[in-house]
Image (spheres, rainbow, N blue to C red):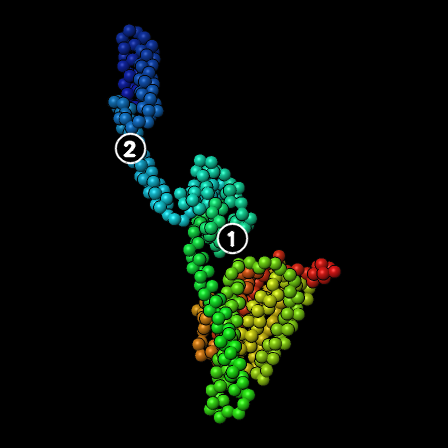
Amino acid sequence: MHVSRHALIISLLALAGAGLLVGTLFSYPMLGLSLGLLAWSLKQVRQFNRLNDWLQREDGSEPPEADGAWGDLFDELSRMQKRSRSREQYLRGIISRFQQSSAALSDAIVIIDSQNNLEWWNRSADRLLGLKAISDRGKPLINLMRDPRFVRYFRKGHYQEPLELPSPVNSDLQLQYQISKFGEGDRLLVARDITRLLRLEQTRQDFVANASHELRTPLTVIRGYLETFLDQELPRPLQRGMEQMQQQARRMEGLVTDLLLLSRLEASQHISDEHPILIQDLIQHMHQDAVALASGRGHSFQLDVDSEYDLLGQATELQSAFSNLVFNAVRYTPDNGTISLRWWVDHKGGHFSVSDDGIGIEAMHIPRLTERFYRIDESRSSASGGTGLGLAIVKHVLVRHSAHLSIDSKPGKGSTFTCHFPPDMVVPIRAVGSDAG
């Protein structure tokens, strides 16, 4: 383009000089110069019109033939146009490949812009969510997905945990929604059909519940006969064996009870109704039971209970969850240890914690503590009489109450298990009293 500018200047000087020379021959040098400049200008206008016509065609045709600066300009623009078309074809190919691959996915994929409007989705979204390409593009998502649970999930903006709901177009399908943020306020919604997985999980739960229920009768019979035999005078080796059998039978009964409770908790993700549970009295009773369980071991207990606020929920479920934490602290805290029970309320909601100064837990075990039958030390757990289901029960009870469990522990310094409840599950004691009245 630098050469073209020089050529343009040279052509201007050539025509101006020729006009000036011709005008001088006829004694009109300024007229000749003006005519030369006019001729040069008309030539530039003609070439500009040719360029404009070529650019407006946009049909990929070759540029007009021209000499000098205009020829160089046409050639350079033609090369730029070819590069642009090649780049456009490449990008169109990428988009086409993306659309083809996303159309092959069984999961629904939806792109939502920063204004919460539908921007793009794949074919599975038509099938699973009922979106229509012709009429729904550009519409707000929550105008089409009207389930209040989905609307709350979408608006809260925290998508660490997925949401499970029936499909809006087929209630027999269960979908798992996961939202991710990207760009400047845009969101990517992925809806996955998990109906088969839920059916398999339901089959597993039914099997565990039925098997546990069927085990109750034989265990009751075995324990009854063992108690009858132990009431009689038996040889010492036989009596020792009978006592161990009775101990294991009790442990199996506890396991069956926990399995049945866990199956019932897994049947629903939310409690059916909620009532004040009188948490102060509940903690007091748990304290008394813990003192009885720790009899002769020298444990000391500390209570710090906020008397201004109560907790809403299912009393039997919360008692089971809290007592599991308290009794675990008693079982796994060495003799002469200290155990603290605390209930307090702040702007984040209500909190119940159980702390001990026992041997603590290594960090590698903490993420798996709420798994069924997960044991840090098999021999220690067996000796304590635990079933390995206590923390799994705690987790499911808290999930049903929209709460969560946090664990803070360091080897040699003890552990703290804290149940965190949202603010809407906490109610002032005065409000409870006035409602009851």
Residue at x 51%, y 53% (from the top left corner): 158
Q: Amino acid at mark 2?
A: Lys
Cβ atoms under marks 2 and 1 closer than 8 Å = no
Residue at x 51%, y 74% (from the top left corner): 217
Residue 69 visible here: no
Element carrying mark 2: helix
Which of 390/110 is in front? 390
Q: Quadrant of residue 127?
A: top left
Residue at x 34%, y 43% (from the top left corner): 100
Compared to residue 115, the image places residue 157 above or below, namely below
Category of crowding for the residue at label 2, using alpha-carbon neighbours closer than 10 angstroms: few (below 14), some (14–19), many (at least 20):
few
Which of 30/35 is in front? 35
Residue lying farthest to the right in this orientation: 437
Q: In the shown orientation, is residue 297 left or right of residue 137?
A: right
Task: Say which mark, if any, is on residue 82.
Answer: 2
Distance from Cα at disc 2 to Cα at disc 1: 46 Å
Question: Where does the image place residue 313, in percent across and percent down from the top left?
Answer: 61, 62
Q: Earlier in the sequence, mark 2 or mark 1?
A: 2
Residue 59 visible here: yes
Q: Amino acid at mark 1?
A: His
Task: Say which mark, if any, is on residue 158.
Answer: 1
Element carrying mark 1: loop
Question: Where does the image place residue 319, in percent across and percent down from the top left?
Answer: 59, 68
Q: Quadrant of residue 92?
A: top left
Q: Quadrant of residue 18?
A: top left
Residue at x 50%, y 76% (from the top left corner): 219
Question: Where does the image place residue 193, in percent across and percent down from the top left?
Answer: 43, 51
